[in-house]
Amino acid sequence: MNQQVSGEGRAGRGPYKKSSATRDSIIDAAMTVFAIHGYRNGSTTQIAAVAGVSPAQIFYHFATKEAVLKAVLDRRDHLADEVAGPPPSDPREIPRAILRIAASNESMPEYISLYSLLVAEATAPEHPAHDYFRDRYRHLRLRFETVFRDMEVAGLLAPGVDAAYAAVSTLAFWDGIQVQWLVEPEGISVVENLRRHLAAITTVVELEA
């Protein structure tokens, strides 16, 4: 027990801390490179240049370029989960919670660009992130369907709209409008368009983010 505590203490100092900081800087750089060039066209040489390290240092911390991609996706998931937080206990608050997440996303265009570019690449079955995005969308559809089911039970979905359709249509609309926003940020509001979508599929009024 004492040895474990001592080891944890050392991890926060000296070469351990420096090594962790270098690894983090490589992940940050990879996020930048992949957001611009995608995984296929983004090279470890580019990542090394952005991170200010040698290519050899990348492969000291990561066995392969694919391992760098996994670390990038893990980082992105952690941030997304932090922004989302737990679902509201009151079903009436669910649309507003979605709009709050969308508003937060607008302050992080680099993350939205990263996600949009990688998911487009990963539609190819041979892409190393194909299974990740397939499973991610399955998880998101289930999560959205669960909260919209709470709204359905509470009588808060519009006539003819069920939880499954609300989940799929909201995810599709959100992804699509974010891509348009990336192309024309000054002409497209993700939050305003998403608000109108949610107003059409729910009976909740006064939808403010």
Image (tube, helix red, strand yellow):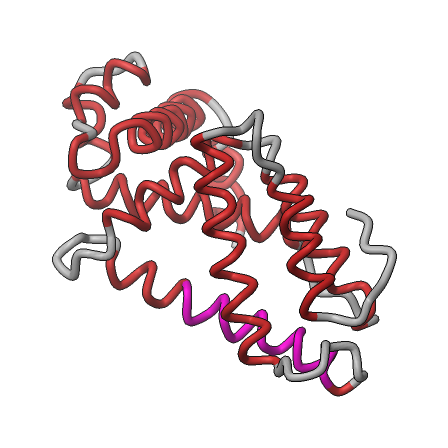
Residues drawn in magenta? 137-152
Left or right, 156 with reference to 13:
right
Q: Quadrant of residue 59?
A: top left
Q: Position of residue 113 (x, y in %)?
A: 41, 35
> Could you say where residue 133 lies in the image, as x and y percent from the top left?
34, 59
Main secondary structure found in the magenta portion: helix
Q: Residue furthest bottom?
A: 153
Residue found at x 78% / y 77%: 156
Q: Is residue 68 above or below residue 52?
A: below
In percent of width and height, residue 17 lies at 44, 26
Percent from the top left, x then y, of residue 124? 17, 56
Please name the residue shown 35% across and 24% down the image: 29
- Residue farthest right in this picture: 206
Residue 149 shown in magenta: yes
Instruction: Answer above or below: position of 8 versus 156.
Output: above
- Placement of 147 over or under 22, stated as above or below: below
Judged left or right of residue 73, residue 209 is right
Identified at 29% across, 48% down, the residue is: 120
